[in-house]
Amino acid sequence: MGPLADRPDASIVAQVLTGNTDAYGILVNRYRDTYTRFAARMLGSLEDADDALQLAFVRAFRNLAQCRDPDRFGSWLYQIVVNECRTLGARRTKREKRLVRDESKVDSAATPDTSADAALRDEIQYALNRLDPQQREAFLLRHVEGLGYEEMSEITGVGISALKMRVKRATERLRGFLEGALT
């Protein structure tokens, strides 16, 4: 990638803003895997996650000059990814309410791998999908992405005490879902 790839986010943002649009690819590569993992868990589908990420990266590029603290580009981008996941999730929920489908047939067609690990992953994702979107988001940011409550608050715009309650309730509900499924 060259010497630019080793530079901090703020330096790369400055390069992009002065016309080196190719440098934006470095930021995309830097954050794509982590944010795809978050979006896939948030939305329950890698395809939806890819859509959310594409929209988020385009939106971030178009609004890069509005990033007030380029040293914290990653957190700023996270806010955009979270918002895109919320929007896509809401659209999908509306779409699914109009469609009637047999989940067991969809699940059996989509999961040819019958290994225990795959079954457990599917069960965990199913349990995550059953959470309220706000609880799922808080749980994933805290326990999967490992963010602190202050950073979570900055990204989501939600108070720390509310986030702690969401994580607590999500954890309790997940435990209940998984214990019921695994017993």
Image (cartoon, helix red, strand yellow):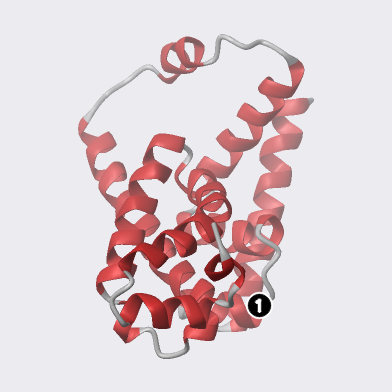
Residue 3 is left or right of residue 66, and the answer is right
Please tell me in which quadrant of the rendered image residue 2 appears.
bottom right
Q: Residue at x 53, y 81 (%)?
A: 72
Q: Nearer the viewer, residue 40 or 158?
A: 40
Q: Residue furthest bottom?
A: 68
Q: Is residue 128 above or below residue 122?
A: below
Q: Considering depth in this image, is 18 or 113 the residue closer to the camera?
A: 18
Q: Identify which amino acid the numbered label 1 is placed on.
A: Tyr
Who's the residue at 56% across and 47% down the image? 37
Q: Position of residue 155 (x, y in %)?
A: 50, 75
Pick out the residue farthest to the left.
98
Instruction: Determine the image quadrant of residue 163.
Output: bottom right
Q: Position of residue 58 (x, y in %)?
A: 29, 61
Q: Crowding near pointer 1: few (<14 within 10 Å), some, many (20+)?
A: some
Instruction: Name the residue rendered at 42%, 78% in the picture.
Output: 13
State the residue position of label 1: 149
Q: Is residue 84 above or below residue 113?
A: below
In the shown orientation, is residue 148 left or right of residue 111? right
Residue 93 placement: quadrant: top left
Q: Name the spot of residue 175 as percent of width and height, x first.
A: 73, 45
> Where residue 111 appears, x then y in whole percent?
54, 15
Q: Is residue 171 visible?
A: yes
In the depicted structure, whether residue 28 falls above or below residue 49: below
Judged from this view, the residue extending furthest toward the right is 183
Figure quadrant of the N terminus: bottom right
Query: Is residue 154 visible to the viewer in this orientation of the structure?
Result: no
- Circle 1: element type: helix
The front one of 62 and 162 is: 62
